[in-house]
Every structure is written in C-alpha cells, then in structure tokens.
Image (tube, rainbow, N blue to C red):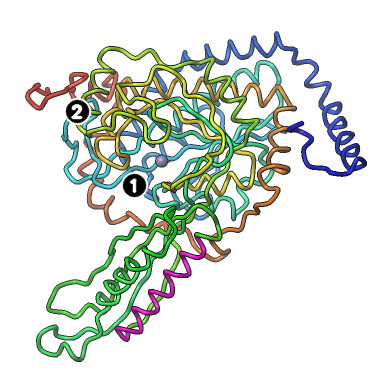
C-alpha cells in the first residue's frame, strides 16, 4: 500500500488508482519491453563497465585529494571535473547560483531526470600524506581532505559514464544530471541551488558521501539542520592606553555575546549544537577594536527549533551591542535543513549495495586501518549501533529507517534538496571507521587503495540503481508517492535563506591564496606516476615515523 497511501475517501482512492494505472499503461510500452532478463543483462554490463574504470576512479580520487581546496575555492577541482565531463559528452553549465566553482553537467534527453551529487571541498589545516599513520603534512598548515570529499565525484561520474554508454547502446530515454556540493563544510551551496531552481523537473537525486562503511537509510537519519550566521559589531577606535574612555570596543561586544550565548546554553534543548569562531578580533592591543565579528553555527533537529535559536542569537547580539554602545549587523553565511531520505529509493539502492558487496581489503589496508584507529584512540564500538570498530568493515551495513530519537549532531545541506525532490544518500566505504571527522587523520586513507576500492564499490551501487531508475518507471513513481504522501504530508519546506541572500563566495579566499602556490608542486601527475602514493614516494602503509619515507 505504500504507493497508494493517504486518500481516506473511496472515490479519491479510486481516482488515484486510475491515475496511477494511467501512468503505468502510458509508460507500459517502454516498461513492458524491459523484461527482467533484459534488465539483468544491463546490470551485468553496468557492473562490468564500472569495474573497467578502476584506473580512472583511482586517478580522480587522487587528483582531487592533491588539490586540497576549501569551500568556495574549488577552482582546480571544478576545472578538472568539468574537463572530464565534457570529454565524456556531457553539456556543462558553469557558475550555477552565482558560485564561480559551481557547475551542472547534463546528458541525455527526456524523463526520468536523475541527479547525482557529491561534495568537493576540504578541511582547514588537514594537509596529510596519504598512507602514513602519523602526523605528516604535505604542506604544513595547509588545507587537506580530512573528511574525504575528494572521493565522491569519482563515485557518481564513473557510474554515470558506465550507464550513459548502455543507454546509448540500448536507446534508453532519460537524463543524467551531475552536480557538485560546493562548500559543504560551510553549508554554502545546496539551499541556493534549490532557491535558484536547479532541481526543477528533477525526478530523483542520488547523493553520495564517504564513510567507514557501506550504508544507506531512509526517513529521518537524526542529523541536525542549521543556520550559519556572522554577527558584526562596529564601535570607535581610540588609543587603548591614552584615551580608552573615548573608545567603544567591538571586540567587547563579541566577547559579551559569546558569554551571553554560553549562559543561554543551559536553557536550550539537549539536541542543540552551537559553536563559534571569532573571525575578526581587532588588529593590535593598543588600538580599541572598532570592528569585530563572530561566526556562529546554530544547529537543532527541526526547522522551528533552529529558527528559535537563530532569534535567541539575534537578541543576545543586540544585548551585547547595547552594553558596549556599538552597532550590530548579521547575515546568513550558510544553511541546511535536517534531511529526510526516500524509502523506495533507499530500498532499491540497498539491494544493489548488497549485490556489489564490500571491497576485498588487503592485509596492507587492514594494517593501516588498525594503525589509524590506534592513533586517533578510536572507540571500541560504534556510538550509534554498538557494532565493533576493529579495522575496515567486511560486511554491508543493515538498511535502517528513521531514528526513534536523536541527540542531534552534524548537518548536511543535502537536507534542502531532500525536502524538494525524492533523495537518497549512499555512504560508500572509502574511509576508516572510528575517526573523529574534520581532522588530518581522516585524510590518511583518502588517496590509498582503501579510498580507491571503496569509491569503485560505491560507483557500482550507483550504476545499478541508475539502471533501476531508467528501466522501471514504477520505482520513480513510488519514490514520488512516498515523497508526497509520507515525507511531506505534515512537514513543509521553508527556506532559511531569502531571495536576496548571496552565496558566501568570499569565504576561504585568503587561506587558499596563502597556501595554493606551496601546494601546486604536489598536484598529482598521472602521466608520470601510477598513483599519488607513488608520486609522494610513500611505502604503503607507513606505520611508524622510523620507517623511512622515500
Ligand atoms: Zn561531508
């Protein structure tokens, strides 16, 4: 009954049933020609095609790792990805939503239109040599892929290329749309894509994210949504010793706001997460700071609770401005809805993940995993499900539904997309379980066989699910039906951003300007080196600092 949930009145139900019969029979001619033997044949060919792209997957994973670009500054990454997509027959539109590093690539025609997305940005101060189980930055202080976003585009692009070849050969209708999660760490792009209509007429979205396991789930995964807000204060400069009574300190306002917020914490729900950094604290101690800014992430489980935190933050900022006789202004830098994932899509994807199975890890892979788990003092069991953390996982996770209760946690702006079109998230096994996240140690596996094999497995699962979506109109229909009658029955998307909020494309520019020239000599050169490990002269795995690194 999943497909025909909701209507309470007999007539309505009858009408809905007729409508669906109409859709099925209209597409019946197409669907009818796809008997199960044909689909099975396509799936075998799709998997073989993905596996034949093993070398290309490794090159893309290693290449993006070597670029190590922060959110909104993914210029090399996007230039490279666009060139690969154009070479493979995709039409690419650049600068989506006024974001210079964004683009969307399309191929094919007609319906269904299936969007494939994955993030591309990295983490500040996370530069790290791959395959080395102790701190050893490639460029000291530079950004690096300490989250693993370097791997996701290979998952979707090589799945799409494999399926595109089969669609061409078999004259299958449908459109592939590939897009990058720009500045995911800043929750900086996806709400803007939705606002600007990028996903209009898209039937379903498969989003992929690196993980220490092979997993997907439907319903509410228990994440927090959030708003990212910068509060700025303007006061009066003065000689900090000669005439401090003539100054109005904007830094005082920032500090008082932070103190106020930290008192407020006691009266917030335990599901909240809030944190801040002072992005401008003045210039030097002998000048009363005339300008200062503090940047907050306000995270909660639901839209009303996020708005309530946001409003509380504004009041505290106003209070700090009153206390210091300064002027306060604020603006949104990023936003994310708490996501909800589609059940029929997750079920289809999960069946394909089981078919692909876990990668065959080598002894070297497991040695590195154990060394990294020791290095980061990984917990012995998983926080959520109590499963043991002991090396790399060897089985596909179980398919999970909505969390019964969540204590809150991280956010992903895929939430905004998930409330606008049926969306599923694939976690593919390209990193080591038990790490902290957003840390240089999370980069260690990300240009090694662990990331290469995990990304290839992910690409296999995406390719098989694309075959399902392009050959089975019933799957697209049931995904829409769940979206309309279950997911959005009572909850309606209201964006956190307005029509005027610009994307925060200035963020991270200064950091990348500082490090880019030092990082360039370490960009991966696949023409000369088989792998990035080879280019850096790293013995895989290097477990102890005493082991000579060539
Ligand atoms: Zn991420």
Residue bearing mark 1: 70
Left or right: 241 as drawn, with respect to 190: left
Q: Which residue is mark 2?
A: 133
Name the chief secondary structure element in magenta: helix
> Horizontal and vertical percent for residue 121?
38, 43
Q: Give whichever of 89, 437 is nearer the camera.
A: 437
Local SS, label 1:
loop
Residue displayed at 37% across by 22% down: 452
Is 410 colored magenta in this rendering? no
Write the start and end of the magenta stretch as one range: 306-325
Q: Reply yes or no: does residue 323 show up in magenta.
A: yes
Residue 8 % position (x, y)? 84, 44
Mark number displayed over residue 530: none
Q: Residue at x 28, y 18 (%)?
A: 365
In the rendered image, the vertical position of residue 41 relative to residue 374, given as above or below: above
Q: Which quarter of the rendered picture does the N terminus lie within?
A: top right
Q: Residue 340, percent across and down?
A: 57, 43
Please say if 140 is above or below 150: below
Q: Classify mark 2: residues with Cα within 10 Å, few (<14), some (14-19) or many (20+).
A: many
């Amino acid at each position: 009954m999943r497909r025909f949930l909701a209507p309470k009145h007999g007539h309505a139900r009858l009408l809905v049933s007729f409508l669906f019969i109409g859709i099925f029979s209209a597409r019946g001619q197409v669907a009818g020609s796809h008997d199960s033997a044909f689909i099975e044949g396509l799936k075998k060919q799709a998997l073989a095609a993905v596996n034949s792209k093993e070398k290309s997957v490794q090159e893309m994973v290693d290449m993006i790792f070597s670029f190590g670009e922060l959110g909104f500054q993914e210029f090399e990454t996007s230039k490279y990805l666009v060139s690969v997509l154009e070479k493979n027959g995709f039409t690419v539109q650049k600068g989506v939503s006024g974001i210079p590093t964004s683009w969307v690539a399309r191929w094919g025609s007609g319906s269904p239109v299936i969007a494939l997305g994955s993030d591309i940005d990295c983490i500040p101060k996370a530069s790290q040599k791959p395959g080395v189980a102790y701190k050893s930055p490639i460029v000291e202080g530079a950004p690096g892929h300490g989250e693993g976003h370097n791997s996701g585009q290979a998952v979707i692009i090589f799945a799409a290329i494999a399926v595109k070849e089969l669609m061409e050969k078999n004259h299958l209708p449908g459109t592939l749309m590939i897009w990058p999660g720009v500045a995911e760490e800043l929750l900086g792009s996806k709400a803007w894509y939705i606002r600007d209509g990028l996903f209009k007429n898209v039937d379903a979205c498969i989003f992929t994210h690196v993980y220490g396991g092979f997993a997907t789930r439907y319903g509410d995964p228990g994440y927090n949504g959030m708003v990212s807000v910068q509060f700025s204060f303007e006061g009066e400069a003065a000689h900090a010793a000669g005439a401090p009574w003539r100054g109005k300190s904007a830094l005082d306002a920032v500090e008082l706001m932070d103190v106020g917020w930290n008192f407020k914490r006691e009266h917030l729900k335990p599901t909240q997460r809030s944190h801040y950094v002072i992005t401008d604290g003045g210039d030097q101690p002998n000048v009363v700071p005339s300008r200062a800014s503090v940047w907050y992430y306000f995270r909660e489980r639901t839209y009303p609770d996020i708005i309530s935190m946001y409003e509380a933050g504004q009041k505290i900022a106003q209070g700090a401005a009153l206390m210091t006789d300064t002027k306060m202004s604020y603006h949104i830098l990023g936003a994310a809805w708490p996501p909800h994932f589609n059940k029929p899509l997750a079920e289809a994807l999960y069946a394909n993940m089981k078919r692909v199975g876990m990668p065959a890890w080598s002894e070297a892979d497991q040695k590195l995993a154990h060394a990294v788990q020791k290095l980061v003092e990984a917990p012995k069991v998983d926080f959520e499900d109590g499963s043991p953390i002991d090396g790399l996982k060897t089985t596909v996770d179980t398919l999970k539904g909505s969390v019964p209760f969540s204590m809150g946690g991280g956010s992903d702006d895929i939430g905004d997309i998930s409330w606008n079109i049926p969306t599923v998230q694939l976690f593919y096994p390209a990193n080591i379980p038990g790490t902290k996240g957003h840390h240089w140690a999370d980069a260690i596996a990300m240009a090694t066989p662990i990331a290469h094999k995990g990304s290839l497995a992910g690409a296999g699962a995406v390719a098989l699910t694309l075959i399902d979506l392009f050959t089975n109109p019933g799957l697209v229909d049931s995904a829409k039906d769940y979206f309309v009658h279950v997911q959005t029955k009572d909850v309606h998307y209201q964006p956190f951003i307005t029509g005027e909020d610009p994307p925060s494309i200035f963020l991270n520019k200064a950091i990348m300007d500082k490090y880019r020239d030092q990082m360039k000599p370490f960009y991966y050169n696949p023409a000369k080196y088989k792998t990035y490990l080879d280019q850096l002269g790293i013995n895989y795995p290097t477990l102890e600092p005493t082991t000579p690194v060539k």
